[in-house]
Amino acid sequence: MRGFLTAKGIIGGGIVVIVLLTALFAPLLIPDTWATQMDMRARLSGPTLAHPLGTDQLGRDLMYRMLLGAQTSIMIAGTAVLMSLVIGLPLGVISGYFGGWIDNVLMRLVDTLLAFPALLLALTISAVLGPNLTNTIIAIGIAFTPYLARIIRGEALRVAQMPYVEAARAVGTPDTLMIIRHVLPNIMPPVIVQVTISLAFAILAEAGLSFLGLGTQPPDASWGLMIQASRDFLDVAPLTALVPGAAVAITVLGLNMFGDVLRDVLDPRTQ
Amino acid sequence: MTKPIVEIQGLRVSFGGTPAVKDVSFAIQPGETVCVVGESGSGKSVTSLSLMRLVEFGGGDILDGRLLLERADGPLDLATAGAATMQDIRGNEIGMIFQEPMTSLNPVFTIERQLTDGLRMHEPLSAAQARTRALDLLREVRIPEPERRLRQYPHELSGGMRQRVVIAIAMACRPRLLIADEPTTALDVTIQAEILALINRLKRETGMAVMFITHDMAVVAQIADRVVVMYQGDVVETGTAAEIFATPKAEYTRALLAAVPRLGEMRGKPAPEPLRLVGDTHDPVPLTPRDTPEPLLEVRNLTTRFPVKGGILRRTVAQVHAVEDVSFTVNKGETLSLVGESGCGKSSCGRSILRLVEPVSGSVYLGGENVLAQTKRDMRAMRRHMQMIFQDPFASLNPYMRLQAQLTEPMQNYGLDNRADRAAALFDRVGLPRSFMRRFPHELSGGQRQRIAIARALAVSPGLIVADEAVSALDVSVQAQVLNLMMELQADLGLSYLFISHDMAVVERVSHHVAVMYLGRIVEIGPRAAVFENPHHPYTQALLQAVPIADPARRKLDTDVSFKPIPSPIHPLDHRPAPSVYDTVGPGHRVIQNSDYA
């Protein structure tokens, strides 16, 4: 665990912890109304004493919206990516490890999903299931699954051909144990990287859905919704985009750093 | 004494603070071959790369020392020469050959382009003139059909031919010094013999000096005028080849030479015998021959083919005939070696027996049970009785598992108890300290890892171990220790080995019986002494002739040698090869009648 105590580990881990704490506790500490109250005289304002990070087009405080939006964004992105991992990991591992017709069937399925742009897919699913939080998560989760499954399959395919897998087969290791002991640990590094990147894209995907009225419903806040809403006011009030944008960027940066460090900590060779 | 062409004085090189070469000094006279020999990490390659000033591109720093190159206008210190000067010297005054002929040629350029590029860089030649020179060079390295080769790309040439092209490129500007960094390590033994003879001839004809980097004492004995022995960044001994081999002074040189198996030294011995290593207090105990051989593994007419897929539908368009009608028997407590060059099917044969690949036909009986008839579940139970040791100890251990877990895994698979105790006993057995049990593979050296691989194979007490090039990736001193361990285990536990190797000298050392494979078939099989001392098949004879012997008094590469290239084992789907038919030429000694070796 000493691996976490590097500059990268401390900064990355610190950001992740702060973002998670914000997502957890901001809604408990900050009343909803602070983020939805409209200050019509201070619309699209820059930083002031009353609004340290400025306001949006309806005069709502950007700081509070950013803090409260954290929960929605993190929860949707986190759960959606977790869901795509839960589906994509077994799909990819089974495809890559067993190969043959199983691989062909599963991967043609995945290719079909890949043929649609992720957002379009999420949009369709969301539209069919109806606009609410759970369905948004399901939509993003399914839309992101093929990407993850593809990468995991490639890695599993590579690992399945490694001599240590053949060696384990020669000592009689059954397939399930083989996957758990030999394949999974060895495909983890690229999977961790892909997951951290997916989280960032999921936050933005939620924004796209929200913009079309299929994600977060106003007056609730989410980072993606805030970025979408800012597009008409970029020239007069850049903060409307910068504040949620910075929140996404810093979160993603923290996740990437944390993912890197996690990968190193899990790899016995780097200790 | 003439002036040396190159003189290295007090060279020190480090990589990011880690010293790689500590204090190296030696000189190379015009027209002589200096072999720099050492095991991995000895700094031999770093020394040669420093001379070319290529070491900087790999992240190394020349800290100290002088690299004097004798030129018409006096000596030039390459260690401080500018980039432009070095560019002029590289390829022009010093030529270099690299280890891997597959990757040291650029795959997207024709042979002509790669040959003429260097020429035209250093000399004002027209395209036509350069082409003529390129043709001359290809003839000089004895490449057949040179005109056609010029238009070809590297992938169209065989490994041996590629290495000839690499040599031709290095020779293009008539360098006064040729640096060859393990130029034959990746090649088969017959091609190695050809390349060594070629370098010898070029040296004689052009009078250039050769700095030859190698780990192989047998190669050194065949070509060296003088030898520089390196160990962990230091020169431990220099001398003429005869001195080094006859009266080695340094402890390390003696240990290195003791570890080298020499072809022919087992003559007259009835059974395999461990090598006598420096530091051994007692003489090695030869394995006692068994009075009544008892068959353990019987392979009959084994045939394995791999499909070659092609076309848009990925249909099977041809087949690789990897193993073709192979039959042999391994007795209890004995070693049968499968020997041959790359692509001869020896590995596929071993893996077919364990059913890591599925054979097409034939039968494999282990202790009377038909291995090929087992269902998937029964096969798992069967594997307990036959285990495998793989070639690459770095890749055959899961990097994420502790060593103890690697050893207990097979026991767990077969429901054995007292796994921790057994694992500890196995650590003792293969000579590793028990404190290693909690470690990960990367914390071990190559030899230690191979001991773990052996311990893993022993974990379920099998009767047969298939060792697929089990010592090929190891340094020679480590190789000797692992070979001795394997023979000791055989004596103590009555193990049978199917020993797969390309190294004739190692095979002679460890085998009771030997089978020589060529193009998927066994061309000659018999007791070790019969095959090595009285080889009947022309291919066996060629192999034995090609093997370098670690004895400078027995040189055999003074004239050009050439062996027949191995034809392709790929045949169309309707190809029906004839069965293997053997003549018996001695007790248990059989030679094929109908091989493809013309």
Image: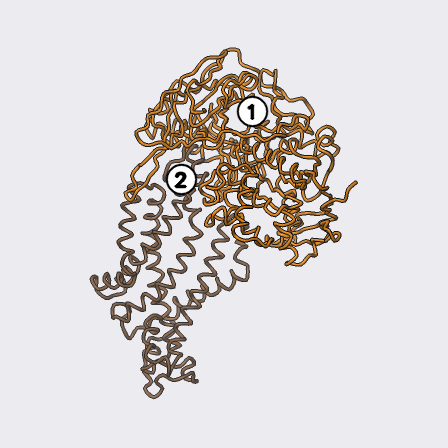
Chain colours: A brown, B orange
Whole-Å distance between the Cαs marked 1 and 2? 42 Å
Q: Which residue is mark 1?
A: B544
Disc number placed over residue A178 in the picture, else none: 2
> Does B98 sit left or right of B176 as displayed?
left
Q: Could you classify mark 1 by the number of other residues whose Cα lies within 10 Å: few (under 14), some (14-19), or many (20 or more)? A: many
Q: Residue A223's quadrant in the figure? A: bottom left
Q: Position of residue B561 (x, y in %)?
A: 57, 30
| Quarter of the view holding residue B82 | bottom right
Q: Secondary structure at mark 2?
A: helix
| Residue at image point 72% right, 47% down | B8
Given the image, on which type of amino acid does mark 2 rest? Met
Secondary-structure class at tag 1: helix
Q: A148 or B360: which is nearer to us?
A: B360
| Quarter of the figure with the C terminus of chain B | top left
Compared with residue B66, is residue B549 higher up or lower down, i.e. above or below?
A: above
The label number, if any, that marks residue B341 in the structure image: none
Residue B375 position within the rendered picture, expressed as x and y whole percent measured from the top left = 32, 28
Quarter holding residue A32:
bottom left
How many residues crowd mark 2 within 10 Å: few (<14), some (14–19), many (20+)? Answer: some
Left or right: where B198 falls relative to B359: right
Query: Is A177 situated above or below B487?
Result: below
Residue, x 44% and y 14% (percent of image)? B583
Label 1 marks which chain's residue?
B
